[in-house]
Amino acid sequence: MLSEIMKYDFGDNQHVRREKLLAKADLERKRRIKSRVKLERGDVSEPVPPTPIDQIPIIVRDEGPFVHYPATPDDIRAIMHRLPPGSCDKLRNIEFTLDRSGDEPSYMIDKNDIGPPDPYIGRFTVQRYPGVYDSGTFGVYDSATLKIQLYGYVYAPDLPNRSELEIFLKCHMLSTFVHEIAHHQDRTTRIARGRWRMDQMRKGENYAELWQSEWVCDCAVPYINETYPVEVNRLLDWLENETGIRLTLAMLYGERLDGVPCFIEIAPIIKAIAARESRYEIQKKLVREMWEGYFHERALEELDRLLPEHESDHEIFRLKGRVLRSLEQFDTACEAVRRALAINPADMPAWDLLVILNDDQKDWPEAVKNAECAIALYRQQGETGPSLNYFLRAAARMKMGDLDGAQAAADEMEAIFQPVKDEQTRINALMGVDLLRQELQEKRRGSGKR
């Protein structure tokens, strides 16, 4: 394949270069798979007996007054005993250490979270919680050596609210550990004997994340609740005192809702508490995190409790509309969003949500009307707004049988978003245009129109 591409004259140098690079990458991937499978098949050693968990070494590499490992070696062993039998077989050791992989933070971290070097040991860090520094990577599994490294945190011994925060960090460290154990199990069992391609990193991450969420629910959260009840209650009391909302540890790190592990992202709430934001703003943020964490019924309960004292706040009505939409209560969601717009007619996210709800209700005339209102308001502000407004307007016209109007709306959408500089916004919009035109073509073909 590569030789054919090298010889073929595409008449487009950029296309030629791209095809060559893709072919070379594919060839390297195939060679990598073959070499690893060959190495694996050459291993004819006797089956390894089960590894006694208590004999797996746990080594502390980096220590100091500012270096902390909130989960102890005893915590790690307790979790290993709770994992499914065989999960830790062949694991050679576990290291507690600091991430010293380089000066750059992890590629998975949002650049907006990256701060200056920490004031204690000078590493390039992320401050996930106030006063708590990490590298952006929490652990790593080495498939070549069958070893796990768990990375420590850096903070002052007199960190404010240290006892409360350390329960969070303990949960986080144990969550990281079961993630790396999932990689280990994947490497030593699931892909053993060439069961699937070993070089597909995203596949491996998906597998590890799936079991991480399961094992946090089944192993880590019950263990912490049983072993540290006083500390957990102190944490939950502190959060309730700051937010007025009582949570559970499971809600923060893993609770099954309809069989699916869900959790609330609590870091933004702790940052808001540290920044001394108003209690009401913190409550709204927490309810939003409940909604994003799929605790929809609980989020609605809290909103109904907050609303009577804050009926002049358009944002809380908009948030209620989002929660009700997630509960598929489209009519009441529309009512909440209209309340938001009655308070603030320039609430653009509320207009965007109203158009989506009209589409959910299959109310095509309202979808067209409100999409056009939203588009006009964005234009008054010198903005294009979300491409979804343009897409839903065209789709609603199509559903109403106005094929010419839908075609014109699709053409306008293309003209507006084709010059947009943001690549992802442009690609998403133009993909929407293609979908609209395909459906229009099918409808015209079915009706005999051209």
Image: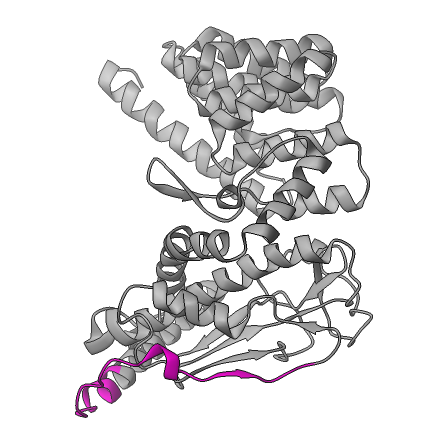
Question: What residue is shown at x 51% (from left), y 38% (from top)?
Answer: 293
Q: Quadrant of residue 418?
A: top right
| In the image: residue 426, left or right of residue 433 | right
Q: For residue 40: magenta?
A: yes
| In the image: residue 161, left or right of residue 245 | right
Name the one closer to the observer, 116 or 49: 49
Name the one closer to the observer, 136 or 275: 275
Instruction: Note whether residue 408 is visible.
Output: no
Name the one closer to the observer, 341 or 270: 270
Percent of width and height locating residue 404: 42, 14
How many callouts does the rendering have? Answer: 0
Question: What residue is shown at x 25% (from left), y 21% (from top)?
Answer: 445
Highlighted range, magenta: 37-63
Name the one closer to the observer, 38 or 252: 252
| In the image: residue 416, left or right of residue 220 | right
Image quadrant in which the C terminus is located: top left
Position of residue 264 relative to residue 3, above or below, is above
Question: What residue is shown at x 82% (from left), y 40% (from top)?
Answer: 276
Instruction: Note whether residue 45 is visible.
Output: yes
Q: Quadrant of residue 12?
A: bottom left
Percent of width and height locating residue 111: 68, 57
Q: For residue 185: magenta?
A: no
Image quadrant in which the N terminus is located: bottom left
Residue at the extreme front: 230
Position of residue 174 relative to residue 340, above or below, is below
Percent of width and height locating residue 428: 50, 40
Percent of width and height locating residue 137: 58, 67
Q: Quadrant of residue 216?
A: bottom left
Question: What residue is shown at x 54% (from left), y 42% (from top)?
Answer: 264
**What colour scheme has been applied to the protein in the rendered image?**
one colour
